[in-house]
Image (cartoon, rainbow, N blue to C red):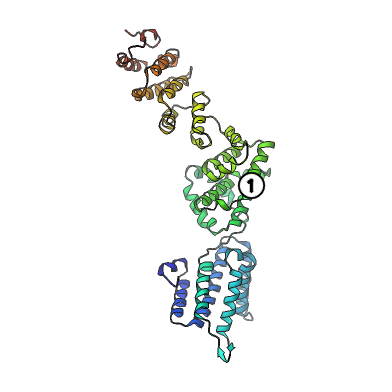
Amino acid sequence: MLMDENELAVFKDKSERNVFREIIDLYYSRNFRSSIVSLYSLVIYDLFLKLNHMSDIGNKKAKTRLSEINESIKNPETHYSDIEKSIVQFFLDNYSSYFNKFSSEIDYLTNLRHKCAHLYLNDNELFIPSQSQTKMLIESMYDNLFKVDAPFIDDLFSIIKDEIDDYDSKYVIYLSNPTEIREKLVKKYYASMIDQSINKTIDTLFKLIFVSQDEEANRHINGMYVFLDSLFWYCERNNKFNQVNFSKIENIIVYKMEYDAFSDIKTQFLVSLGHNYQAIKSCYSKRDGLIDYIKKLIPERARRVMHYYNYFSTQELIDLYIDRKIHSISDMDYDELYKFYVINLKMNSNDFFKVAFKTIGVYNSFSTADVVTGLFMKHFDEISQECFKEVLDTYNLNSQCYRRDNNNSFVSFIKTKMSVFAEIDFKKYKNISTFE
């Protein structure tokens, strides 16, 4: 370390950067006593800035301690050493786990600082720290304190519960464009959480969303989902899923699966989490029957099946379509279904169109017939004679196909293909047209 200019970027406060640069200069000029004294002062100042930031974002403990310190500063009888001890003790009591070896090394630094700043004789000589001691402490404070951002969140829910109402109103925006909200929450909260606090927050949110019967919790379920989903997103991007205690999540889901049906919105959340995050889906997969249970929660509507495709094997998806278990297919869905099944899943286009024509309703379906027929004509070069014949059989029996205004254009198209498919008896399709 000692010291690249780029490493000074961890100091957001200009005066901190200047003092740290001064500490390094003192070290290289072999003024080790001055370097240690200045390092101690910077540590106290850095902790004081962190305390202020935590107070500003609503940390009640920090706000109380900061108020006490400010009152002490006003008191002319107060010794500044007592203020320094109060600042250090606050972090030792509440957040020592955020600093690697913080407790032992802050004591070591404090002890060295006192020896350097006050008369301390050793064999009739003033105390002078060694170069290795000074270097070790500078690097330790840089890596384990200065680089660690506030607010050192232990229990996120206690801080965000007053904000959840605001995120209820942002839920719809989050579903369509989550990136901005996710990045904001990461910067404001998640980046300052250790694994223990992440686990605690996930556990709290999961219970409130999926278990709690409290009316207040149920009213704010959308806002809590925004926090839970975005926290999972942060864990995935920062390789923190291996620290998450998934056994509690599994137990909650299994319990609810066996004893209590989820509401529609909770079902959607449960399915979405497994779809969005492979680690959550893997968590589901560890329990027998859980993935099958999740699949049953997915409405067999075209858009839902395509959206949550990763819960199914390729063959399961094809079987859902072939067996015509997918319903609620809108006119706008057919082109997407073709891309999904034929292009992505490599389904045979002949099989696709055989089913597609059978999905055209027998009432109020002229527009659907237009869409399916248009898609069929567009991809006709992929069609076999056997498929063409089956499509004509289906078409000829559905009045929504042959009585629509665009039937004539389909007839004209067929006539251009009659010579290619000479083995088909076109004359039998009298509902479509009188083919000569």
Residue 328 appears in the figure: no
- Residue drawn at 38 percent across, 17 percent down: 388
* Vertical order, 307 against 385 (above or below): below
Q: How many marks?
A: 1
Looking at the image, the residue that sits furthest to the bottom is 124
* Vertical order, 300 against 117 (above or below): above
Q: Which residue is mark 1?
A: 247
Residue 239 location (% of width, % of height):
52, 53
* Vertical order, 341 against 362 (above or below): below
Q: Name the side, left or right, on which 24 lies relative to 158.
A: left
Quarter of the figure that contains the C terminus: top left
Instruction: Please name the amino acid that badge 1 sits on.
Output: Ser
Q: Name the side, left or right, on which 167 lies relative to 341.
A: right
Q: Name the side, left or right, on which 110 lies relative to 346.
A: right
Q: Callout 1: helix, strand or loop?
A: helix
Which image quadrant is residue 77 in?
bottom right
* Vertical order, 123 against 105 (above or below): below
Which image quadrant is residue 426 in?
top left
Residue 192 appears in the figure: yes
Residue 271 location (% of width, % of height):
56, 39
Residue 97 location (% of width, % of height):
60, 63
- Residue drawn at 65 percent across, 40 percent down: 254
Residue 88 location (% of width, % of height):
60, 72
Which image quadrant is residue 374 in?
top left
Q: Name the side, left or right, on which 90 lies relative to 178.
A: right
Q: Residues within 10 Å of mark 1 (few under 14, many from 20)?
A: few
Foreground: 154 or 62?
Answer: 154
